[in-house]
Image (spheres, grey):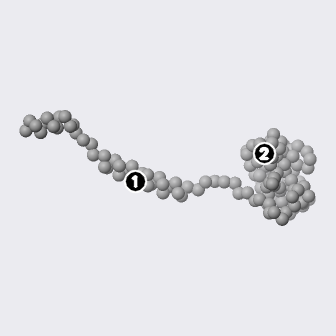
């Protein structure tokens, strides 16, 4: 009897970790399943085809250029971000079917690019295209 009592005093009480591991594995499976159903938001980009003209100024589209220092240029003049929508609407009055082409230089902030794209869509343009340098 004394021998059993001494072994229990020295060994102490043991904790069974099996239920805790079951809970952890169930949580892991839950998070994996939930993560597979999460859809990330993004911006839809319409890239021009290869058969279109190389220079966007030669086509009949409305050209909006965003410089690397975040300046916005339309028709060879600097435009404020608040005036982009009005300028696009004015140009659309001349040619209602004209698409908008946004040409962005490296180094421009993404917020300015998104603001210009939003202004173009709000002005009622049919398509917003993105010019790319090859």
Front residue (pair 16, 73):
16
| In this rendering, position of residue 48 left or right of residue 8 | right
In percent of width and height, residue 12 lies at 21, 37
- Between disc 1 and disc 2, the foreground one is 2
Residue bearing the label numbered 2: 106
In percent of width and height, residue 64 lies at 84, 51
Q: Is 103 placed above or below 48 here? A: above
Whether residue 92 is visible, yes or no, is no
Real-space CA distance between mark 1 and mark 2, rounded to the nearest whole angstrom: 46 Å
Front residue (pair 19, 111):
19
Q: Residue at x 35, y 52 (%)?
A: 22
Q: Residue at x 73, y 44 (%)?
A: 111
Front residue (pair 80, 102):
102
Q: Residue furthest left?
A: 1
Q: Is 12 placed above or below 50 here? A: above
Crowd band around label 2 with a 10 angstrom C-alpha radius: few (<14), some (14–19), many (20+) = few
The C terminus: image quadrant? bottom right
In percent of width and height, residue 119 lies at 78, 51
SS class, disc 2? loop
Q: Quadrant of residue 93?
A: bottom right
| In this rendering, position of residue 45 left or right of residue 57 | left
Q: Quadrant of residue 80?
A: top right
Crowd band around label 1 with a 10 angstrom C-alpha radius: few (<14), some (14–19), many (20+) = few
- Asked if labels 2 and 1 touch by Cβ distance under 8 angstroms, the answer is no
Label 1 or label 2, whichever comes before in sequence order: 1
SS class, disc 1? helix
In the rendering, which numbered label is found on residue 26? 1
Q: Residue furthest bottom?
A: 51
Q: Residue at x 20, y 37 (%)?
A: 11
Q: How many marks?
A: 2
Q: Quadrant of residue 131?
A: bottom right
The N terminus: image quadrant? top left
């Amino acid at each position: 009897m004394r021998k059993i009592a001494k072994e229990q005093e020295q060994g102490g009480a043991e904790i069974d970790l099996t239920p805790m591991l079951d809970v952890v594995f169930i949580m892991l499976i839950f998070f994996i399943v939930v993560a597979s159903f999460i859809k990330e938001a993004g911006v839809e980009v319409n890239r021009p085809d290869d058969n279109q003209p190389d220079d966007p100024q030669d086509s009949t589209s409305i050209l909006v250029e965003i410089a690397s220092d975040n300046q916005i240029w339309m028709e060879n003049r600097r435009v404020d971000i608040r005036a982009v929508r009005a300028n696009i609407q004015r140009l659309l009055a001349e040619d209602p079917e004209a698409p908008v082409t946004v040409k962005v230089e490296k180094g421009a902030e993404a917020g300015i690019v998104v603001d210009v794209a939003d202004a173009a869509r709000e002005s009622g343009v049919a398509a917003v295209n993105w010019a790319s340098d090859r």
